[in-house]
Image (spheres, rainbow, N blue to C red):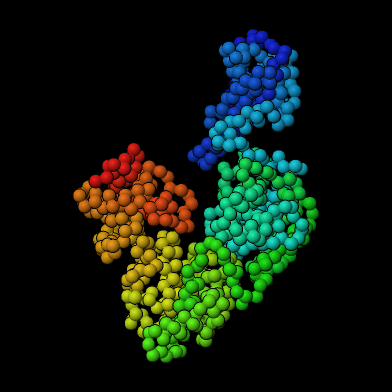
Amino acid sequence: MGEVSSLRVGRFMRLPRRSDERWQGGLVRLPSWVDGPDGPFRAWAAAWVSRSSGLVHAKIEPERNAHDWTLALDALIEFGFQRGLVECRPAVLEVADEDLGRRVREALGDRDLEIAPAPGLPAVQVVLAAMSEHAEGRPMLAGALDGAGVTVDRMRAFAAAARRFWESAPWRHLGDGDLVHVEAPSAGRGLAHVALLGAAGQTFGLAFFHSVKDHEAIDEGLAPSAIERPRWSVLFGPITDLPFGDADLWEDHGLPVAGGEAYPVAIRFGGAEVRRADARTLAYLEGLLGAFAATTEDEIDTGRWTREVETYDGTVLYRLAIPALLEPLDAPAPVRRHGRLDRRAMERVTAEIGRFFAQSEFESLEDANRAIAERFQGSFDALPSTAGSPLERAQDLAYRGFEARGRRRVQLARKALELSRDCADAWVILGEHATDLERAGELYAEGVSAGARALGPRVFEEEAGHFWDLVETRPYMRARFGLAQVLERLGRREEAMGHYRELLRLNANDNQGVRDLLLPVLLISGRDDEAAALLDRYAEDAMAVWRYGHALVTFRREGDSAAARDHRREALLANRRVAKYLAGAAPLPHQEPETYAVGSEDEAVIVARMLAEAWQATPGAAAWLAVAGGGRGGSKKRLR
């Protein structure tokens, strides 16, 4: 901010005036974010567009919050001096801010300069949209006020409801597997079925579906074409994720927001089509957010509940239902036609076979196999339970919980604990559902204690080393594994390592993959000798995480030795893609894959996340890996 010299003003005023020149402009935010010491911000600029020639000139503020009307005056004068392009002064200035226009005219001393109103600066907005499309590679998204009938006051009401929703955190109780049917009020197309996002801790908000089948198709990983169908969502994130028009609303009008990661946007995506909510849709979404914010956990478990909500358009009654929770608790789980099955649920058959053996006598192995084939033919889902004790009946409920989705899992787990507090798997389900790490740790710890009580000391004494071979020990192992992972995420690595070590002592065959998690923690903690011993213990493991771990341990001990290079070569052969992340040649994706195939990019991301901290903490390791073709400029031919 500052003054424009009288000398420059005088030179500008000596330029010829052209009666056909109308310049539209003023102070505008640029359609981009700039990283600053206090966080990202939108830079301001003074922009002028010649309506006759289409020429554009912009002058960006020199630093954050360094703009006022003099920036617009300075840019105007620069525009007039553009040699071979303009070299004139306008007859008319079109401005959205009439005060700015008058100030510019007075500073120029140009009484004949006409000031005309141009609300929204449409010609300038066209230029900004083109700038955004060039930078982002796609058209600039419409702002919230582009929705028919949407006003700043309506957006303020929507923002207040979104803040209440975020602060109430309803994803603690519901997840994307729980499809909620909005029975009232009547909603527009594609707005009557909704799931809450947030339980996974990555994406927060509401996702809408066209029908129950539509939700099932996406939940089970089917129909990519269905996923591309236009669908509404309300998503939360940082202000930098908002369309620029929405960001301007929050910054210009101080709309309420729960925090830096909680700016809401209501938008309809689908293929190339993007739509913003009109006034009616926005009011519906406002009310729905408010209804969820006021909903209690007990109401959810009834399966159907109502809430009167104050919206911008008045009081509205919302009636919500989760059809899956209206089914009796003992109803069979819906059959998943596709998607991943929870392998833990299949252990019920093993448990039934064990009980069948315990209650029967056979003269030969052939007789036993024949009896099993007859007893367990047909669908395992229809297999009647022979559970007798409270713990066995509770475990059966836990197996059903593993088969269920969403909130039904929690209900089955809690019912199981009513039958027996020693049901470790019921605590595991509750631990998996918890969104707070401390609480999850408490639940897993309860599961460990429950499993120990259920097994008794004799099993620990007599079966140590091959625990997993006994189906009744697996709930305890799952609880302890879950506890160790939570402790590691909480930064309590010493405790986590103790649990990992004990799990491997109890089950040397390591059916749970404990060694893959213990190795990185040992490396991060500088326990190279123990890490080397672990690597030797499972030397036959050819997985990429093992190979890259072996290469790092050897490099730490021996430097660029022949043995270290051999292990590096084996790591690159196992999955070369890992190296680009460990060597710093590529940033790790924010989202971790749920599954992977050996040698795939997904495996590379998972392995790199596990080992990146240890590699980065080892001086020279990243460069050493890059030399072999794992980093910038590397070549696959340089393996040795």
- The quadrant holding residue 465 is bottom left
Q: Position of residue 314 (x, y in %)?
A: 79, 54
In the rendered view, does 255 fall on the left or right side of 630? right
- Residue 16 position within the rendered picture, expressed as x and y whole percent measured from the top left: 66, 9
Residue at 66% in and 39% down: 142
Apparent side of residue 435 relative to residue 15 in the rendered image (left or right): left
**What's the residue at 64%, 23% (across, down)?**
48
Which residue is more in the foreground, 233 or 431? 233
Is residue 31 in view? yes
Q: Residue at x 57, y 46 (%)?
A: 238
Considering only vertical position in the picture, is 253 above or below 328?
above
The number of callouts visible is 0
In the picture shown, does residue 208 fall above or below 469? Answer: above
User: Residue drawn at (72%, 18%), measured in percent from left and top?
Assistant: 92
Task: Please state the horizontal and vertical placement of residue 378, each as a whole percent of the image.
Answer: 53, 76
**Looking at the rendering, which quadrant does residue 100 occupy?**
top right
Residue 90: x and y in percent read 68, 16
Left or right: residue 373 compared with residue 496: right
Quarter of the image containing the N terminus?
top right
Q: Quadrant of residue 626?
A: top left
Is residue 167 in sight in this rendering?
no
Nearest the eye: 1 or 372: 372
